[in-house]
Amino acid sequence: MSVLGYIVRNIKHRALLSLLTVMAVTVTVAIFSLLLMSKESIEHGAQKGYGPFELVIGAEGSETQLVLNTFYRMGAPLGNISYELLQQVEGSEHVDQAFGITSGDQYDGYPIVGLEAAYFGSRYEDRVLDSGRLHQTTGEVTVGFTAAQELGLKIGDQFTGAHGAVVGFDEEGHTTEEEYSSGEEYGSGQAQGEVHSAEAAEHGQHTEELHVDSEHIEETHSDTSDGAEHHGAGNHDAHHSFIYTVVGILPKLNSSDDRALFTTMDYAWAVHDSDEAEREVTTIIVKPSSLLGLQMLKQQMDAHSGVQAAYSSKAIADVLNMVDSGSQLMMIMMAICTLLAATSLVLSLAAAIQERKRDVGLMRLVGKTKRYILLVTIGEGVLLTIIGALLGVVAGHIAGAIISKQLFVYAGIQLQPWSMAEYELLMILGALVLGSLASLGPAMKVYRTDPITLFRQ
Amino acid sequence: MITIQQLKKSYGQQTILDIPNWTVEQGDQVALLGPSGCGKSTLLHILGGVLTAEEGNVIVADQLISKMSEAARDHYRSQFIGYVFQDFYLLPSLTAKENIEWALPNQGSALQRRQLIEQWFERVGLSDQMNRYPSQLSRGQQQRVAMIRALIHTPPLVIADEPTGSLDWETASHIMQLLLELSKEKGMTLVTVTHDLHLAELYPTTVHMTEINEMLKRTAEKGVMV
């Protein structure tokens, strides 16, 4: 009988204890695997998230917030900047390409982004549309791959958007603040305002239900200064009378663009009936002509009142540092998990070897070699670890596949469940070393014991 | 077959064995008798190459085991010795047949080994029990399986340490007779330790430890003197 055959029989003989040992290793490795996958996906997504657009120009505030909102559509936008600034940037000698972005409306929870179609050629180069064509005129929409799947949109479909308001309430529950539509986003407001926004998002297609919320929105508009009252009710009507038509579906781009609906930049002005003087954009993304140009442009923009320019790479690096800090905390937790799994493994193997002291004594008496005895005793732990580690990797990836869609929809993290993360092989190797070490101690101890003593015990 | 010269074995300060000279011929069947603590099992384990003595030579089947390294003694046990124990020591995770396959040295083809195992099971009357686990066998059946394990590779020397100690007398008698028959059939030398004088009478040769162990003689003389 081969060593492996004997080990397998022993494992089967102690099925429950073996199963528990394998499960301890499996769970630990699966969590590790998922963590590594997530970390890699976040880093990968963050690094490729801004494409060639090294500079983001927007309203003053947090640079990180500006960049995250622009490229990942996370959090609330900071506010708006004038359309004239976009024209000025476009005409700058330091700029290779610049695109203005208007945002603030959504359809069923997915953001409607006003962004000229040339952006896709600039960022994704030769990618071919999944179907249809890119948007060209006001009201035409190119839908991100995931958004199209989740919303069931196809070419020719029409829908109306819903307005998003970031509102706050004072203690009496009255609206105290509201931001202009093109700088607003759902789900990022405060307290009651957020609830209303979420409801509006959820029922974006249903006019009647939306009407309840839009009354509130209407009210908030009326509180805005400088003529907001003028288009408050008008906004409400405009949102429901402005028809979007799907003309194209993007391919899967593995970026936050998969979760958005793109239309022409002027949609916000059309929806809100803004005249030329009132036209604003939320942000401007810039592909600089040179490194020097990048710095010059940033300085120029920062000099404008109420305007800031942020380096995309720096903001992303800040985020990654935060992710790393979070990961380190997770790693500490995982180290504790690993310690528990290793303890479980050591106890299980020690118990197994204790149970088999007589077997080891017998092996020595029938003349089995030292190599054979050590292979049998250590091999069991190693085999259990291998089984646990492989099952853990598979379980981690299956879990990744199961949650990847929802994770992307809700958090924008694009897991790659069917590819090995960078340190995954190292993790498997580490598990094997741990399993071997856990087995080696008890095995050596029992081997060194006189066989007669083993029998007496 | 067995030659012992000037053998001395101690545990700490206490000398257990002092055998100036003892020989056993090839094919002999010897019952070793003696009270507890007289060194019977220690002598068996020295013959089996499990224990080593401080002094003297032990030669078994032309092998000078007293000078062997640990690895050489492992090999010696696998080729030259068959062990039968009081408590059988079958591996619980393997069936009766697998217990034999596991212990059988890797000689001949797989088919030859399988046929050999089946012949032995048939010989001891356990053909229909080969695929049962030890826990599913009676104690007598377990000892018969353990006997197959000890004898199947036809070692020159079979060592049995109280092989019937945990069996009822009728079964013990049957097992002891079977052990004698099988070792005789294959021309193996058999040295058995037993407390049971009736079972010892089944053996052609009976040796009391006091006859060969000078230490016991000295202790007895001291006892008389006291």
Image (cartoon, rainbow, N blue to C red):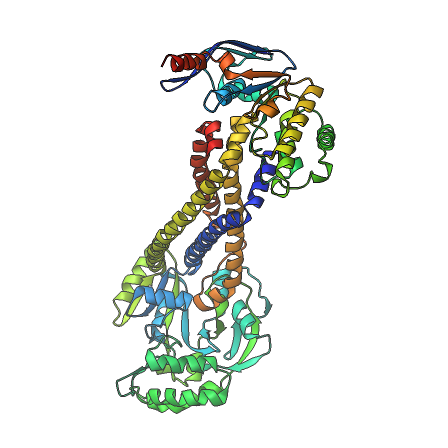
Residue B119 visible from this viewpoint: yes
Q: Quadrant of the N terminus of chain B?
A: top right
* Corner quadrant of residue A276: bottom left
Query: As rendered, which of B68 and B119 lies closer to the eye?
Result: B119
Query: In screen coordinates, is B187 left or right of A439?
Result: right
Query: As rendered, which of A303 and A61 lies closer to the eye?
Result: A61
**Percent position of residue A422, x then y:** 46, 48
Q: Look at 47% across and 53% down and name the residue there.
A: A27
**Percent position of residue B166, x then y:** 56, 34
Q: Look at 57% across and 23% down and name the residue there.
A: B197
B69, above or below A69, in the image: above
* Corner quadrant of residue A43: bottom left
B131, above or below A81, in the image: above
Q: Quadrant of the C terminus of chain B?
A: top left
A446, above or below B72, in the image: below
**Percent position of residue A209, x then y:** 47, 88
Q: Look at 41% across and 66% down and name the residue there.
A: A72
Q: How many marks?
A: 0
Query: As rendered, which of A369 and B84 lies closer to the eye?
Result: B84
Query: As rendered, which of A182 and A300 lies closer to the eye?
Result: A182
